[in-house]
Image (spheres, rainbow, N blue to C red):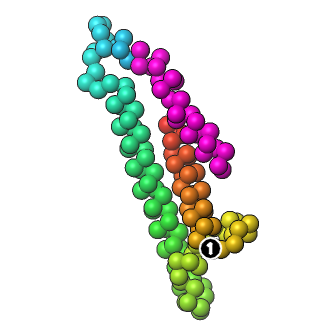
């Protein structure tokens, strides 16, 4: 997971080298016989990145809200022990694979959230390419 995140970060940092041929094509397309564009390729890509990033945040928040609601309904309808409705119990279930390797503490929870968020954003931005 971390290797993929580092590769994506490296790709993002070298984006200016990759976009240079596209920018020169964008400049060519601004002259006749092509229709002039109101926005440059750079601003279009920034807009797409911001929209996809915002949608990724919303998607991620809705994922956790839906997961916690499903967990809450499962406990409410299937178990008589309603004391397991805490958010900590939900996290133990949600990141159970992480807690098989690491002890349940704040570091492990933050690592689980970070890893999940990193993969969500990678997945959303890779859909663009």
Q: Is residue 77 visible?
A: no
Q: Is residue 52 left or right of residue 118?
A: left
**Residue 69 drawn above or below residue 47:** below
60, 102: nearer the viewer: 102
Magenta range is 1-25
Which residue occupies the extreme bottom position in the image? 80
Residue at x 63% of width, y 67% of height: 108
Which residue occupies the extreme right position in the image? 101
Residue at x 56% of width, y 64% of height: 110
121, 106: nearer the viewer: 106
x and y, in percent, of residue 121 in the image:
52, 48
77, 66: nearer the viewer: 66
Q: Name which quarter of the figure residue 6 lies in.
A: top right
**Residue 27 drawn above or below residue 82:** above
x and y, in percent, of residue 25 in the image:
41, 15
x and y, in percent, of residue 17 in the image:
51, 23
**Secondary element at tag 1:** loop
x and y, in percent, of residue 44 in the image:
35, 31
Which residue occupies the extreme front position in the image? 107
Which residue occupies the extreme top position in the image? 32
Say which residue label 1 marks: 105
């Amino acid at each position: 997971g971390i290797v993929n995140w580092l590769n994506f970060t490296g790709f993002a940092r070298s984006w200016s080298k990759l976009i240079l041929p596209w920018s020169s094509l964008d400049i060519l397309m601004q002259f006749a016989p092509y229709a002039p564009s109101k926005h440059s390729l750079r601003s279009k890509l920034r807009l797409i990145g911001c929209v996809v990033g915002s949608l990724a945040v919303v998607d991620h928040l809705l994922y956790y809200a839906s997961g916690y609601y499903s967990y809450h309904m499962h406990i409410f309808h299937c178990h008589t022990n309603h004391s397991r409705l805490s958010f900590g119990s939900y996290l133990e279930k949600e990141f159970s694979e992480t807690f098989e390797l690491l002890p349940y503490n704040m570091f492990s929870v933050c690592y689980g959230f970070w890893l999940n968020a990193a993969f969500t954003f990678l997945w959303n931005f890779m859909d663009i390419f």
